[in-house]
């Protein structure tokens, strides 16, 4: 039987956590999004926002979760060593990553070892499984959840996800750079007709030219993609660390004028497809 389907944002920034007076409203943690699809828990990326999510899960008793990593740059995995449920043997965690050279398990073992971190991956007592795949594959984590993937244009590569459940869909498209001409055909195909698209909008059209080649996009490109792909709502995500609450609120107001229902992602925000 189908159940509730929603997303909750625990980290919405890119590059580096940015706590401070100027980020209190939208939040300063890096990428982490909780997705609930019926009784299934999916986690998109393991940035610093994963700490808060993990703490919130402690009261739930044993959990079973799917962790879908877009890629392995530090801002997307730095929360993993601090994810409390990973140290509880009653819990199960399956970690997915696309096109990870040498495999995701070996990559995380390299990250979680001295001198980078004092606690090795093997100290995590939860039942952890690792799933490697190629971007473009369809994933079947179980139940009525279906996941499609595609490759993104980002240094060292990245993967976008489309989660379909009960006739509704959420797409997670972060850390990608739009082509010089036109729109990315892979993204257009993935997000076609989606209810929610969470999109990398680190830059805007004004500041993007000085960051060309850095592997990030603009909110204007997100709008164009969603309009062409008949997406219901755009969620602007992966905010640059120097974007203040005031600037993001101004952008949120602009989005509401240009495409009602679209929003700027904020920590704690819950959206239903």
Image: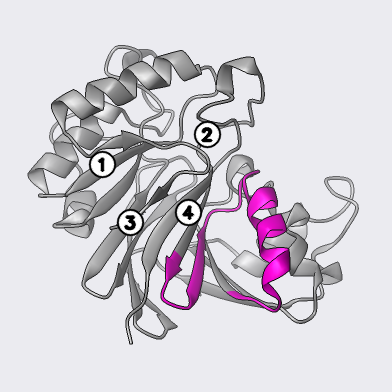
The residue pinned by badge 3 equals 272
Q: Quadrant of the N terminus?
A: bottom left
The tag earlier along the polypeptide, 1 or 4, is 4
The tag earlier along the polypeptide, 3 or 2, is 2
Q: Secondary structure at mark 3?
A: loop
CA distance for labels 2 and 1: 16 Å
CA distance for labels 4 and 3: 22 Å
The residue pinned by badge 1 equals 234
Q: Is residue 179 visible?
A: no
> How far across and down, in percent of the image, does residue 191 sit?
21, 55
> How far across and down, in percent of the image, does residue 48 sit?
65, 43
Q: Quadrant of the C terminus?
A: bottom left
The residue pinned by badge 2 equals 13
Q: Are marks 3 and 2 in contact (CB under 8 Å)?
A: no
The answer to which quarter of the image holds residue 134 is bottom left
The residue pinned by badge 4 equals 70
Question: What span is in magenta?
Answer: 36-64
The tag earlier along the polypeptide, 2 or 1, is 2
Rendered residue at 22%/31% (across/down): 221
Magenta run includes residue 273: no
CA distance for labels 1 and 4: 18 Å
């Amino acid at each position: 039987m189908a159940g509730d389907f929603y997303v909750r944002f625990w980290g919405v920034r890119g590059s580096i956590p940015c706590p401070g007076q100027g980020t209190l409203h939208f939040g300063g943690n890096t990428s982490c999004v909780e997705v609930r699809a019926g009784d299934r828990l999916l986690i998109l990326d393991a940035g610093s926002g994963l700490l808060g999510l993990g703490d919130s899960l402690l009261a739930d008793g044993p959990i079973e979760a799917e962790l879908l990593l877009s890629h392995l740059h530090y801002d997307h995995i730095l929360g993993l060593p601090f994810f409390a449920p990973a140290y509880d043997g009653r819990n199960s965690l399956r970690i997915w990553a696309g096109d990870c050279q040498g495999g995701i398990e070996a990559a995380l073992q390299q990250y979680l070892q001295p001198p980078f971190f004092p606690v090795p991956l093997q100290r995590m007592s939860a039942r952890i499984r690792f799933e490697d795949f190629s971007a473009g594959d369809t994933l079947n984590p179980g139940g009525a959840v279906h996941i499609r993937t595609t490759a993104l244009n980002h240094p060292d590569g990245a993967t976008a996800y489309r989660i379909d459940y009960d006739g509704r869909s959420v797409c997670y498209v972060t850390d990608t750079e739009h082509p010089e001409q036109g729109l990315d055909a892979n993204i257009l195909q993935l997000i076609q007709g989606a209810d929610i698209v969470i999109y990398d909008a680190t830059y805007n059209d004004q500041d993007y030219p000085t960051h060309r080649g850095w592997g990030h996009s603009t909110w204007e490109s997100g709008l164009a993609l969603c309009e062409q792909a008949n997406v219901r709502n755009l969620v602007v995500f992966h905010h640059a660390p120097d974007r203040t609450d005031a600037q993001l609120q101004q952008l949120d107001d602009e989005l509401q004028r240009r495409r009602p229902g679209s929003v700027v992602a904020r920590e704690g925000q819950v959206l239903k497809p």
